[in-house]
């Protein structure tokens, strides 16, 4: 099948590469000419395990190509996936400018019936707006061309997106048209062969499903973080509580880990967008507001624990920080807890030596230049180099190399044997036996 994908960002690249891997002919279009040139040479601008090899292989086989020409992409296919960004507006709503711009371009250029598939995360009612935008452009042309608009939200975890697409838990298809549903079944058949995973529902139902799923996962995280805060006050180990409640089949273990908050491009943005949608429709989003408020508080937790141990004024002290990306497996630092921790430590007068396996370039580009210029933040070449002369180690992201470090080396290179564990990776009793002062989350 010939498929076009609008947007060569995270979702668009994973979508295009995975469809191409199954034998489809894919045209990816993006307005960023430099990005398109790099992708055409097989240079992938984001860190996602396995994506570079997938794109390189399909480039060699001629199953995927990249272009800046929307006209070329529209002419090449009758199935158009919209996978452009929907950044948050100031009021928390999703900015649909990119989505509707693509829709208008499709309306200006299609010459034959087509199916338009919304892959971007968008609020309920967006498919209707896409349909209106395409229809308005066709009317201006005086053209009568049939088209369908389908909602097909992505459920990709950064760091594991290829596996999520290739072996999905479910494929949500929002459409009221049986022909469009059948087309989507054929397109996704290679990914759902061992059992039926494709769920067809109304377009608005599909749009809501995406937001509700992310909001539910964020809720579990914030709930557990609130329980952890209480555990700290009353002398309870939240890890034992997690195991106890997770063993209940109605609850399960997923997304029940206490930590220093969630970040990234999805959960924060989607919770805020759902809050905005609720208010627009006269619903007070009490739970969702609490989820967001708890998460913002949780991001400040590590720096507060540092201040509790060393005092509010941290001048003359250096802290080692392990982990800059918002989660393992990605270089994405958007809304990462590490950024909040860095801001608070530096504002209190501390210097920081930080290390991350893949997010160092992003940190250099995205963090304030004055932190580097004034020597307040140094990016270490190796995780152990970050420890030199530090008053404590602050662990923010649970990368695999951080899970079982050589604690002898850690103790030797720290100025003081103190660890603030923002992901509860370590055994408190083991570290205490090794002579460390240990501070976890809810422990």
Image (cartoon, rainbow, N blue to C red):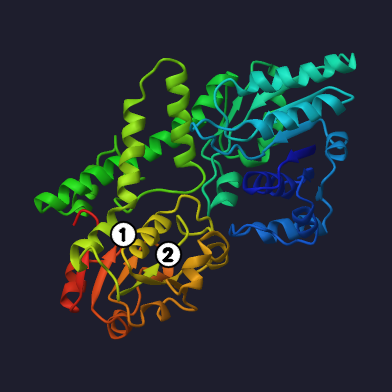
Q: Secondary structure at mark 2?
A: loop
Q: Is residue 169 above or below residue 40?
A: above
Residue 44 in view of the camera: yes
**Which quadrant is the N terminus positioned in?**
top right
Q: Residue at x 29, y 86 (%)?
A: 412
Q: Residue at x 35, y 61 (%)?
A: 347
Q: Position of residue 290 (x, y in %)?
A: 31, 34
Task: Give the residue number, with chain letter if any, for mark 1.
Answer: 422
Residue 263 versus residue 57: which sits nearer the camera? 263
Whether residue 40 sits left or right of residue 308 in the image: it is right
Q: Position of residue 4 (x, y in %)?
A: 78, 38
Residue 179 in view of the camera: no
How many neighbours does mark 1 have within 10 angstroms: few (below 14), some (14-19), or many (20 or more)? Answer: many
Whether residue 66 sits left or right of residue 412 in the image: it is right
Residue 217 versus residue 251: which sits nearer the camera? 217
Q: Is residue 33 above or below residue 217?
A: below
Q: Is residue 39 above or below residue 91?
A: below
Whether residue 314 sits left or right of residue 324 in the image: it is left
Q: Secondary structure at mark 1?
A: loop
How many neighbours does mark 2 have within 10 angstroms: few (below 14), some (14-19), or many (20 or more)? Answer: many
Q: Residue at x 65, y 18 (%)?
A: 128
Rendered image: mark on residue 216: none
């Amino acid at each position: 099948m010939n498929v076009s994908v609008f947007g060569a960002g995270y979702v668009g690249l994973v979508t295009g590469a995975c469809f191409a891997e199954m034998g489809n002919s894919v045209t990816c279009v993006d307005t960023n000419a430099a990005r398109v040139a790099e992708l055409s040479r097989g240079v992938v601008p984001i860190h996602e395990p396995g994506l570079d090899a997938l794109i390189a292989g399909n480039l060699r086989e001629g199953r995927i190509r990249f272009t800046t020409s929307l006209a070329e992409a529209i002419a090449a296919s009758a199935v158009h996936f919209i996978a452009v960004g929907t950044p948050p507006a100031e009021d928390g709503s999703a900015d649909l400018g990119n989505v509707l711009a693509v829709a208008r371009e499709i309306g200006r250029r299609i010459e034959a019936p087509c199916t338009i598939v919304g892959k971007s995360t968008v609020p309920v009612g967006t498919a209707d707006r896409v349909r209106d935008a395409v229809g308005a452009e066709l009317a201006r042309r005086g053209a009568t061309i049939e088209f369908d608009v389908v909602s097909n939200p992505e459920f990709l975890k950064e760091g594991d997106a290829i596996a999520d697409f290739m072996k999905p838990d479910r494929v949500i298809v929002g459409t009221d048209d049986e022909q469009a549903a059948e087309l989507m079944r054929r397109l996704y058949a290679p990914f759902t062969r061992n059992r039926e995973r494709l769920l067809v529902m109304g377009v608005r139902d599909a749009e809501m499903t995406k937001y509700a799923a992310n909001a539910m996962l964020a809720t579990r995280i914030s709930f557990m973080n609130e329980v952890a805060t209480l555990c700290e006050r009353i002398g309870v180990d939240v890890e034992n509580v997690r195991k106890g409640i997770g063993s209940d089949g109605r609850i399960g273990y997923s997304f029940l880990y206490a930590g220093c908050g969630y970040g990234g491009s999805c959960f924060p943005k989607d919770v805020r967008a759902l809050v905005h949608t609720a208010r627009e429709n006269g619903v007070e989003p009490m739970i969702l507001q609490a989820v967001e408020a708890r998460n913002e508080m949780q991001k400040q937790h590590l720096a507060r624990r540092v201040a509790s141990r060393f005092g509010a004024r941290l001048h003359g002290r250096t802290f080692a920080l392990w982990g800059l990306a918002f989660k393992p497996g990605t270089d994405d630092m958007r809304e990462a807890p590490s950024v909040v921790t860095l801001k608070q430590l530096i504002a209190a007068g501390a210097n920081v030596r930080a290390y991350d396996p893949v997010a160092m370039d992003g940190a250099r580009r995205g963090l304030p230049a004055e932190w580097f210029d004034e020597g307040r933040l140094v990016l270490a070449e190796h995780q152990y180099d970050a420890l030199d002369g530090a008053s404590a180690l602050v662990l923010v992201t649970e990368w695999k190399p951080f899970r079982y470090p050589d604690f002898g080396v850690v103790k030797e290179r720290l100025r003081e044997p103190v660890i603030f564990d923002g992901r509860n990776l370590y055994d408190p009793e083991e570290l205490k036996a090794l002579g460390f002062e240990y501070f976890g989350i809810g422990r």
